[in-house]
Each structure stands twice: as structure tokens, then as C-alpha cells.
Amino acid sequence: MLMGKVVGTVVSTRKDEHLGGLRFLVVRELDGELKETGGMVVAVDSVGAGTGEVVLYAQGSAARQTYLSHERPVDAIIMAIVDEFEVGGEKLYVKE
Amino acid sequence: MLMGKVVGTVVSTRKDEHLGGLRFLVVRELDGELKETGGMVVAVDSVGAGTGEVVLYAQGSAARQTYLSHERPVDAIIMAIVDEFEVGGEKLYVKE
Amino acid sequence: MLMGKVVGTVVSTRKDEHLGGLRFLVVRELDGELKETGGMVVAVDSVGAGTGEVVLYAQGSAARQTYLSHERPVDAIIMAIVDEFEVGGEKLYVKE
Amino acid sequence: MLMGKVVGTVVSTRKDEHLGGLRFLVVRELDGELKETGGMVVAVDSVGAGTGEVVLYAQGSAARQTYLSHERPVDAIIMAIVDEFEVGGEKLYVKE
Amino acid sequence: MLMGKVVGTVVSTRKDEHLGGLRFLVVRELDGELKETGGMVVAVDSVGAGTGEVVLYAQGSAARQTYLSHERPVDAIIMAIVDEFEVGGEKLYVKE
């Protein structure tokens, strides 16, 4: 999984028929110091993530292993909201 | 998923027998500011996308999760046409 | 899929037992202007591609979705020979 | 697989329902000289790895091939703790 | 598939229970001129490859398509030993 920050949304009305009801969020990838790497992905939201939240997202076939996304043409999913990120005994991020 | 812009087409008559009837579109990857990243992919079209349109495309096994592409040797699919792309409360793209 | 140019072959006699009868071709990746990107892959040929031909190749699990490659340990397949590559209304490549 | 070093943990309470009981570890990728490449991933722990340990991790669908991770939305797993890493006849790493 | 050169081994005693009996080899990626690219991967050996040999390796779910690796958490496999590598009519490598 990678860490990312939710920064926006994508709206689509004309889409594959398997995609009804899914929310597409814009996620910027974060590195080990919580800085943006420049990478961006559009991921399906399975946890009710909101703008500004730090999340974990999975890519590839893993993105279809939720009830929401099963057998749908999606390759990235937000599967967890990060509460704490700790490196070397130091808490670099704590969700408020 | 990644965002991209449809810029062209690929025509092939000699191809794997599972590929009949599929449209192959040339898609340039877009970043979070809708600028081209330099990345390019040839993706199957599942939504009737046209040249110039901003789309979402999925890669890997996700590309086979449409009726059109099921069990076919394709690794990239356009699965949505983008209506709106919003980041930080600002609409960076609205389809005309 | 990515576009590539077939430039050579790999011969192997000592290989996994599932790989008998497959042709391994050396493919150089092409960008949107048909220039080599520097990327290279060894792909199974499912369409009778020859040296110098411009092809489409699929990677990942898609590479096992042909009769030839089904359930075999291969991660890249040439699944189409390109006849025409058109960008912005201009034909950048037409097969002779 | 890639080699990495465990450097921290991620805690999440709000997550996909399939993710209960999994430990998420922060892993920094190592190169062939055991130096950090700058790459980072959050991986599920299947072997009881601790901070500072050198591990092997698998990505993609391979990450779901343990009892722990079967059919769960995860794309990276620590599946081995490295005892010895030998290159060119020289032991570059031996676990203490 | 990518071409690589076997340069070493990884030994692990504490690992996922599905991994018994597998050999983990250190492989350095080679480019089209047989120079090392700087990329490295740890791959399961399915063909009895030895140090110094030039091999083909497959990544992703393809790595589980051998009897040895079926349903195991591995994402890279050496599935062929290269006898000859020919580009543009010239043999750039012939196994001795």
C-alpha cells in the first residue's frame, strides 16, 4: 500500500455500467516524511474518506477485494484512513 | 485509475483472435493540473470516448472487468469520461 | 498496452516446462512519436510478428489471455501488429 | 520480491472490514548494497517482523497468497525475514 | 519478461509457511546491450539457474504459474536460462 492525501474528486456520468455508486477521489502520494511525491492517482473510496485525510490505498487486483469494488474495473482503492504513522519510534502523523 | 486525454487511434487487422471488435485509443496521461506527464498508453475504449476527451483509465487485471474486455489480452481500459475534476474546492476541469 | 518495435529474439532451451513452443521476441518500447523510450521487454509472440514490425504488447496477467499463453509463466505478450497509428488526425505510422 | 527494512508502523481504526487483525508496517526499499533507494511501501506483516529487520516483500496479487491476507484488499506483504544476503560470494548481510 | 543476471542468493528461515523449498536468487536487470540497469529483484528459481547466468524472469501473477510457485506469495520467477540473445541479426550473447 502507499500513503496518500485526499485532495479532490472526479465526477463522471458516462462510465462503464459496473461503476454505478462508486466515489472517485483524487489522491496525492506521500513519502515517508509525509511530503507529496508528485504522484497522483484516482482511487475508489471504500471507507468514507474526506478531503485532507491521510489514507492508505491499494493498487492492482487488490483494489477489487472489497464488497464495493468486487469485479469492477477499478485499479486503486482507499482501504484505510490513517490514525497514526510512526517511524523510528517517532509519531510523524497523528490524526486530529 | 489515472486521468488521460484521448489523442488518437491504433488500427490493427492482424491481432489475437480475442480482440475482434475492440477500439484501441491513444491516451496521454494527465497530472493533477491536467498537464501531460509524457506518459502514453493504448487503451481499449468501453465508453465511446472521442478524441480530445478527458477520461479515466484503469490498468492491469482491472482492464478485463467489463463485458467488452472479459478474458481478453488487454491491460488498459477507458472506463469513464470525466465530467468534472475538482481539487481543493476548485473545479480544474468541467466538460463542455 | 504499449507500442513497441520488434528488434530481436531470445532463445532458451532450459526453461519452465510450461514454456515449450513459445517464441520470445525482444521489443523496444516506442513513445507517442514512435521514438524509442529506452525501455525494453521480452514478450511472447501470439501474432507472428517479425523483426522491424511495430506492435502492441500487453503486460501483467493480460499476457496469459491467449490460447498460446494460458496458465503459463509469462508477463508480456505481443497481441497485435499495428497497421496505422494516428494522433491528432495525422497518420504518424502506416504499415507498408 | 524486493528487499526492505522495517522502519515503522501505520495504525488505522477506520478501514475496510476485511482488514481486521492485520499489522501494517512501513518498509523502506533496499538496493543490492543494502542502501535505501528512497522507495517506501506499507506492507502487511505475515512473519512477525520487527523494526530494523531486513525483509523480503512481495507486491501485487502475490500479497494475497497467505492465510492472513487471502481475499483482502492488500497489495504488499512481508513474507520472509532475511538471514543472509550474499552477492558474488560475499555475505553483504548476516542477521545477528 | 526482463533479462537479468544472477548474482547472489537470499537465505531465510523465518518465512511464510507456503515458501518452504524455494530458492531465492538475487537478479540484476540487464538492458538491450546486456548492461546492468541498476534494477534488482529477488526471484524464485524454477530452472536451476546458477550465479553468473543470464536469465529471463517474469513478474506479477505470472510468477505463480509454475508447479513450484503455484499459490505461493511470490512476485518474481526465473523461468528460463538464456542461450542466445540476438538483436538486429547480431548475437549479443551466446551462453558458453
Image: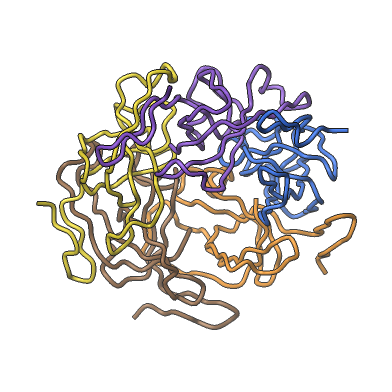
Chain colours: A blue, B orange, C brown, D purple, E yellow
Q: Is residue B86 left or right of residue B76?
A: right
Q: Quadrant of residue E50?
A: top left
- In the depicted structure, whether residue E87 falls above or below residue E45: below
Of B66 and D80, nearer the camera is D80
Of B4 and B34, nearer the camera is B34
Q: Residue at x 29, y 72 (%)?
A: C52
> In which quadrant is the C terminus of chain A drawn?
top right
Q: Residue at x 61, y 72 (%)?
A: B7
Q: Is residue A72 left or right of residue E93?
A: right
- In the depicted structure, whether residue B11 falls above or below residue C47: below
> In which quadrant is the N terminus of chain A drawn?
top right
Q: Is residue B30 left or right of residue A51?
A: left
Most extreme residue toward the left is E96
Of E16 and B34, nearer the camera is E16
Q: Residue at x 74, y 38 (%)?
A: A55
Image coords of residue C46 (percent x, y):
31, 54
Q: Residue at x 44, y 75 (%)?
A: C35
Most extreme residue toward the bottom is C90
